[in-house]
Amino acid sequence: MTLLAIGSWFQGHAAETMWAVWIVIWLATAGSGKRTVESEPVGSRLLTSAVLIAGGALIVAGGSVLRTPGAAILSDPHIASAIGLPLTALGLAFALWARVRLGRNWSGVVSIKQDHELITSGPYALVRHPIYAGIACALAGTALAFNQWRDAFGFFVVLAGVLRKARLEEQILTSRFGDAYREYAARVPSLLPGVRWTTYRK
């Protein structure tokens, strides 16, 4: 395979390549977290995971695997890619930044760790859930890059799962940190910087 052919392949699969690299980095930097002392019930966890997986599968199957014609989001696919791919890269980078900043407090499920710290700096000074925000941004960009309305539908399914998980996390963090978390939530929006409709609700 020539370099030109390789470059052409990556250009046509840029979103998939970015996600693959991100997943490898995400897994490689997982490390060992603090011991979990409280977590959401298994049934709740499975429900959220099912919604997130279903939405992600819609995007992957519709845009990456099937690649069959469908209703386009934008009439010009080049414009869709020019907007969608940078959004994908930005979202993935933002989520990684948040993961690094969270350190050993991070967990793949909604939980409280032993000696859990309330992180409010870095990306957490912009939004309360930067990992969820970054992943949602990346998925929105990927759906736009694939440029099919079925991919956009998959994104909204994922968003429903993200909002549910964020709400559960708010509840468990409030129970752990009390007024400190309420004060933090009162000044920092949930998922979109500067957008106050995402503010915390008791």
Image: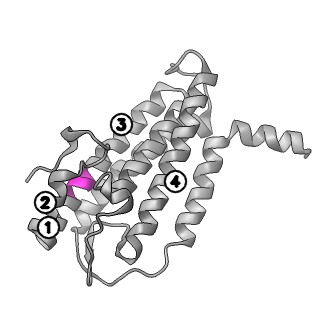
Structural distance between the alpha carbons of marks 4 and 3: 21 Å
Percent x, y of residue 189: 24, 48
Three-letter code, disc 2: Glu
Is the C-beta separation of discs 1 and 4 under 8 Å? no
Residue 42 location, quadrant? bottom left
Real-space CA distance between mark 2 and mark 1, rounded to the nearest whole angstrom:
5 Å
Q: CA distance from mark 3 to mark 2?
A: 30 Å
Q: Residue at x 12, y 60 (%)?
A: 182
Instruction: Give the residues in magenta.
Output: 164-168
Q: Secondary structure at mark 2?
A: helix
Q: Amino acid at mark 3?
A: Phe
Marker disc for residue 180: 1
Quadrant of the rendered image containing residue 32: bottom left
Q: Earlier in the sequence, mark 2 or mark 4?
A: 4
State the SS at label 1: helix
Q: How many angstroms separate mark 1 from mark 4 (CA)?
A: 28 Å
